[in-house]
Image (cartoon, grey):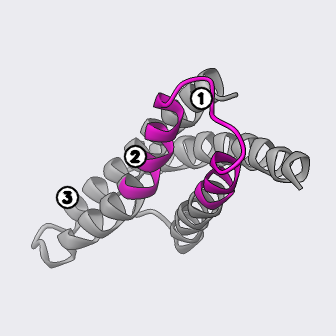
């Protein structure tokens, strides 16, 4: 069972890193064009958040049988699981702002920035993983 879980944990890590980079580029493009992020972007962001939670559960299963090379690896995972929903909810708070352009730019900047931050966390997870 351990090899299967380890394989899935690694593959989810690759998928999440690629998804974070794609969403980061997409969100940055929307921000630079001063456009609101699309429903597709939001769905991708929520998918990344959900897959991060699944990745964390797989990591917890692996922790029962083996230790990562560095415990910092676990911290990167916990950070991503807490950070992504927090930024999503915080970015949504600006919906009552008077200036529509400012609200759109703020949301795009926050969500795109969050994608780049977790992309770095996922990459560091690769470096500290077992």
- Chain-order first, disc 3 or disc 1: 3
- Whichever of labels 3 and 2 marks the residue nearer the N terminus, that label is 2
Q: Which residue is mark 2?
A: 79
User: From the viewer's perspective, is 70 left or right of 3?
Assistant: left
Residue at 74% over, 50% down: 12
Identify the element where label 3 is drawn: helix
Frontmost of labels 1 and 2 is: 2
Which residue sits at x=39%, y=64%?
85
Residue, x 59% and y 29% (percent of image)? 123
Q: Label 3 vs label 2: CA separation? A: 28 Å
* Residue farthest left in this picture: 98
Question: Which element is circle 1 on?
Answer: helix
**x and y percent of residue 130 in the render?**
70, 28
Q: Is residue 68 left or right of residue 45?
A: right
What number is the disc on residue 5? Answer: none
Front position among marks 3 and 2? 2
88, above or below 117, in the image: below
Element under label 2?
helix
Q: Position of residue 61 (x, y in %)?
A: 68, 56
Q: Is residue 74 magenta?
A: yes
Q: Quadrant of residue 93 in the image?
A: bottom left
Q: Earlier in the sequence, mark 1 or mark 2?
A: 2
Q: What separation in Å lies between label 3 and label 1 (alpha carbons)?
A: 31 Å
The one nearer the camera, 108 or 102, is 108
Question: Magenta span covers which residues?
Answer: 56-82
**Which residue is the extreme one toward the front?**
65
Examine the residues drawn in magenta and state their main secondary structure.
Answer: helix
Q: Which residue is mark 3?
A: 102
Q: Which residue is mark 1?
A: 123
């Amino acid at each position: 069972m351990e090899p299967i879980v380890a394989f899935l944990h690694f593959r989810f890590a690759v998928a999440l890193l690629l998804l974070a980079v794609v969403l980061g580029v997409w969100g940055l493009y929307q921000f630079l064009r001063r456009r609101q992020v699309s429903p597709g972007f939001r769905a991708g962001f929520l998918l990344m958040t959900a897959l991060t939670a699944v990745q964390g559960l797989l990591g917890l299963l692996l922790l029962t049988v083996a230790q990562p090379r560095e415990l910092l690896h676990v911290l990167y995972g916990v950070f991503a699981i807490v950070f992504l929903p927090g930024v999503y909810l915080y970015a949504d708070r600006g919906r009552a702002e008077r200036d529509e352009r400012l609200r759109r730019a703020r949301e795009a900047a926050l969500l795109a920035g969050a994608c780049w931050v977790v992309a770095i966390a996922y990459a560091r997870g690769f470096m500290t993983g077992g």
